[in-house]
Image: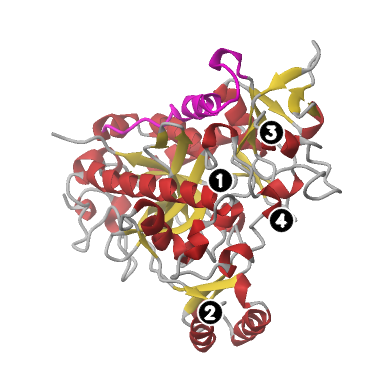
């Protein structure tokens, strides 16, 4: 099916040279059977799509789907930009991803249990134990603590990119408090309204079971009988950038949203203050950073924490999801070790590829990075949101000099990777009143319970809305799309 012959929407669409476009192939045709599914879109003219995009934006505004950008002088509350043109992933491609995600989460769960336990991995001759023990994300105070229910990564968010060959690779792991799933669920509601006919044609896998799955996972590991379990979502408050998500998940999970002042610890048990008196709390889905979680253990000046909550956690009287200390597996200095972690704990070869990574703590890697700064992407090992990063091919000489000095001063804090050409999808650009290719990544979500990992069949597709940009983060001008994982077709 040749899109350009069917509608003005694709008539001027120009793929980015060298990038894998997920909808339009090298022959400028819509790929395979996607043409049939996308026919309602292809038949539209730009005015019709603009109207639907406006309706989608209005729906998100009315639902209060926002995030915060503290550095923006124009105001902190922003509506998450949404492109109504969905991203489509075929069943077979998703099935391969799902197997790789399950393998990765199983291995990282075992790694975290080992790091805070027997530490057998640190005797592996292929790794430097200092990369783990000297990480700022490793919390030695938590060593020896076994979480109630035996699960540490209750929710995992694994960032994936698709290279020029169309293959997926892991970019980074998010195992502390991965955010964004509320946008996945809200995007689905909106896209079904905007493209009802196309949604029916495509036979898309559901995502709306996520809140029930997460609630059940919290109950399954609680130190009480299922019928007695009280779970809550702990938020640092309304000024947090992801506060919309905290309220959304509490509401859809059917549990209470609480702040630190709503909780107290007595006799190593956690209670919620209620009008009927203290109520025992068994599982806490915490969205407060662990360094602020308990002033008795971490930052004594924290007003966002609950004094004694780590004592209750260590005693096995409350579940903290995700477990404190998971940040060691988020450390980008540990990321290059994950293939070896999989081999060590599972005796398997990794099913998902990774981006080649240079560890500046290693002398040979550091020398290469310093010589090739103009070609590489340099990242802080504890960085997030696209901040603290050098995009070498787009950098100035002054920027490279600054990063050279930083790397030499603190090499353990930096890694470097080649600039990977991200895949693109057709994206509605309101200012230009047309579709243009924009780079995307993907964050699938994995919930782990005692039965093992479960992968949400969809995910957060983040879009770099700025022309030519590789940065998809919402805090730096990125947007999102609904991710349609298609049913298997007979």
Which of the two discs, 3 and 4, sits closer to the camera?
3
Q: CA distance from mark 3 to mark 4?
A: 43 Å
Which of the two discs, 3 and 1, sits closer to the camera?
3
CB contact under 8 Å: marks 3 and 1: no
Q: Quadrant of the C terminus?
A: top left
Determine whether the residue tagged by mark 3 lies in a helix, strand or loop.
loop
x and y percentages locating residue 243 in the rendered image: 67, 38
x and y percentages locating residue 430 in the rendered image: 48, 51
Q: Residue at x 27, y 43 (%)?
A: 95
Q: Give the residue at mark 3.
A: 315
User: Is any part of residue 431 visible from this angle?
Assistant: no
Q: Give the residue at mark 4.
A: 72
Q: Is residue 326 above or below residue 470?
A: above
Which of the two discs, 4 and 2, sits closer to the camera?
2
> Mark on residue 362?
2
Determine whether the residue tagged by mark 1 lies in a helix, strand or loop.
loop
Write down the region rendered in magenta: 203-229
Q: Residues within 10 Å of mark 1 (few under 14, many from 20)?
A: some
Q: Residue at x 60, y 36 (%)?
A: 245
């Amino acid at each position: 099916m040749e899109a350009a012959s069917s509608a003005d929407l694709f008539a001027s669409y120009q793929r980015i040279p060298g990038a894998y476009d997920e909808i339009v192939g090298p022959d400028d045709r819509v790929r395979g059977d996607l043409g049939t599914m996308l026919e309602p879109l292809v038949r539209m003219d730009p005015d019709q799509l603009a109207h639907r995009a406006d309706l989608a934006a209005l729906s998100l505004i009315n639902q209060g789907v926002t995030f915060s950008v503290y550095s923006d002088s124009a105001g902190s509350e922003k509506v998450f930009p949404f492109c109504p043109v969905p991203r489509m992933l075929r069943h077979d491609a998703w099935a391969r991803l799902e197997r790789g995600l399950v393998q990765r989460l199983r291995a990282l769960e075992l790694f975290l249990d080992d790091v805070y336990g027997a530490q057998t991995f640190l005797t592996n001759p292929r790794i430097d134990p200092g990369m783990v023990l000297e990480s700022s994300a490793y919390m030695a105070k938590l060593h020896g603590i076994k979480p109630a229910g035996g699960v540490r990564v209750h929710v995992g968010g694994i960032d994936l990119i698709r290279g020029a060959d169309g293959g997926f690779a892991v970019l980074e792991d998010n195992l502390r408090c991965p955010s964004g799933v509320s946008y996945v669920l809200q995007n689905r509601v909106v896209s079904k309204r905007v493209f009802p006919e196309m949604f029916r044609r495509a036979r898309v896998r559901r995502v709306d079971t996520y809140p029930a799955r997460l609630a059940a996972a919290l109950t399954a590991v609680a130190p009480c009988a299922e019928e007695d379990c009280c779970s809550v979502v702990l938020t640092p408050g309304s000024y947090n950038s992801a506060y919309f998500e905290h309220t959304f998940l509490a509401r859809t999970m059917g549990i209470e949203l609480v702040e630190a002042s709503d909780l107290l610890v007595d006799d190593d048990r956690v209670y919620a203050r209620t009008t009927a008196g203290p109520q025992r709390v068994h599982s806490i889905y915490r969205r407060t950073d662990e360094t602020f979680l308990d002033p008795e253990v971490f930052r004594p000046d924290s007003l966002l924490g609950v004094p004694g909550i780590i004592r209750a956690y260590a005693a096995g009287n409350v579940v903290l999801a995700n477990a404190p200390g998971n940040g060691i597996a988020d450390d980008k200095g540990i990321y290059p070790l994950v293939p070896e972690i999989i081999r060590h704990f599972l005796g398997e070869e990794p099913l998902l590829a990774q981006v080649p990574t240079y560890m500046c703590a290693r002398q040979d890697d550091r020398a290469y990075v310093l010589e090739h700064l103009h070609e590489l992407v340099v990242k802080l090992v504890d960085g997030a949101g696209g901040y603290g990063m050098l995009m070498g091919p787009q950098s100035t000489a002054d920027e490279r000099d600054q990063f050279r000095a930083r790397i030499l001063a603190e090499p353990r804090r930096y890694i470097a990777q080649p600039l990977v050409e991200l895949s693109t999808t057709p994206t509605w650009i309101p200012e230009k009143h047309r579709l243009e290719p924009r780079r995307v990544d993907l964050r699938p979500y994995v919930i782990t319970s005692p039965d093992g990992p479960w992968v949400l069949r969809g995910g957060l597709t983040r879009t770099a809305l700025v022309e030519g940009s590789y940065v998809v983060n919402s805090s730096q001008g990125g947007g999102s799309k609904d991710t349609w994982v298609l049913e298997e077709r007979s």
